[in-house]
Image (tube, rainbow, N blue to C red):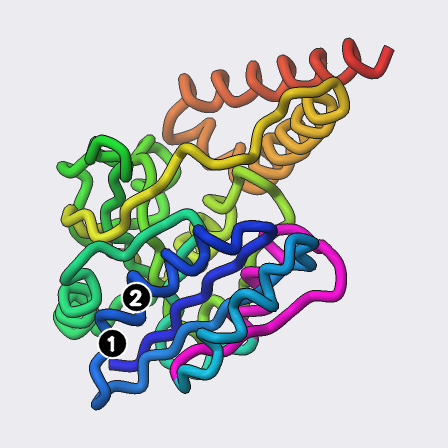
Amino acid sequence: MLLSFVIPTYNRASKVRRAINSVLGQIEDTTSTEIVVVDDGSTDGTADQLKSLVSEKRIRLITHTENSGVAAAKNTGILNSRNKYVVLLDSDDLLEDGGLIYLTGLLQDNDDCDLIFSGSRLLRNGALLYDPTFKGSKKYKDLLTCRIGEYLPICRSIVLKEFLLRDLRGFESITWLSIAKRGYKVFYDSTPIRSYDDEGDDRLSNRMGIIKNSEDMKRGYSIYLKEFGGDLKKYNLKEYLILNVKYLCYSIMQRAFVQ
C-alpha cells in the first residue's frame, strides 16, 4: 500500500518534528511510505532544524521562499507526492500508535474508494471530534447535509492532484464536496487515528487579525453558497438559511472593523 503523508508547517519546528516522528516511528522498512514536509517560508529556522530528519530516506523537505498559506503548502506537497494515496496531516497533528497499520488495512478493505476519512480526537483530553455513527460509504448529498466534525482525510493521489485545495482557510470541505459531487467514491471510518492539538499559537488577538478573519470567512461562505447553495437549499433548507446568516454576519463584521 503506497502512502504519502503531506505535512505543511510554518514556524512550528517542535510541533512538526513531533508530527513527523509519530508517522516515521510506524513505517516498516519493507514499505515505500513517504513523508513530504513543506516549510511554508518559516522565519524561525524550522527548515534548518529539520535537516537532521531529512537525512532519513523516507522524508523529503520542500521549502517555500516566502509564506504562501497553508493551502498552497499542502498543494505543493500533494503535487510532489509519489504514492497512490495522500494523507493530509497538519503540523500540530499526531498519527496515533498503530494508526499506520490500521490505515493500511482500511485502504485495502476499501480499495475502490477515492476519498476516505478516518476519525480524530483532541490530544489534550481524547474527546472525539466527529460523529462516530456517521460511517460507511457516503454520497455527495450526505456530505452536504450533515455536520460531521473533524476527520483525517486520505485521498487517491490522482484525484487530489486534479482538485487540489482552495486558498480558503477553514473551508477545506469545499474540496471534499467538489470531489463527492463529481461522483468519486467516499467512505467514512469511525476509528480515531489522528490526534489534534488545539492549543496552537494561531490567535486572532488584534484588530487586523479580526478584519482578516472576517474577510476570509465571508469569502469562504460566499464561494460555498455559490457552488453548493442550490443543492443545499433543495436538500436542507434550514442549513442553507443558517449559512446565509453566517455570511451576512461576517459581512457586517468586516464593514464594522474597516470603518
| Circles 1 and 2: CB atoms closer than 8 Å | yes
The structure residue drawn at horizontal position 31% and vertical position 86%, both measured from the top left corner, is 32
Task: Kindly identify the amino acid type of the residue bearing the numbered disc 1.
Answer: Ile
Residue at 47 percent across and 72 percent down: it is 36
Q: Circle 1 sits on which residue? A: 27
Which of the 4 image quadrants contains residue 56? bottom left
Relative to 198, 146 lies left or right: left
- Identify the secondary structure beneath mark 2: helix
Q: Position of residue 124 (x, y in %)?
A: 27, 33
The percent coordinates of residue 248 (x first, y second) are 64, 15
Taking the view exactly as shown, the residue that stands out farthest to the right is 259
The reply to whether residue 34 is in sight is yes
Q: Name the quadrant of the N terminus.
A: bottom left
Q: Position of residue 140 (x, y in %)?
A: 36, 47
Vertical comparison of 179 with 210: above or below = below
Residue drawn where x is 19% and y is 61% of the image? 99
The verdict on residue 67 being magenta is yes
Image quadrant where one finds the C terminus: top right
Please check the rendered image and state whether residue 29 is part of the magenta-colored stretch, yes or no.
no
Front-most of residues 236 and 214:
214
The answer to which of 64 and 56 lies nearer the viewer is 56
Label 2 environment density (alpha carbons within 10 Å; few <14, some 14–19, many ≥20): many
* Residue type, mark 2 in image: Val
Residue stretch in magenta: 58-79
Residue 158 appearing in the image: no
Residue receiving disc 2: 23
> So how many labels did they put on this image?
2
Q: Is residue 123 above or below residue 210?
A: below
Q: State how far apart marks 1 and 2 are (Cα).
A: 7 Å
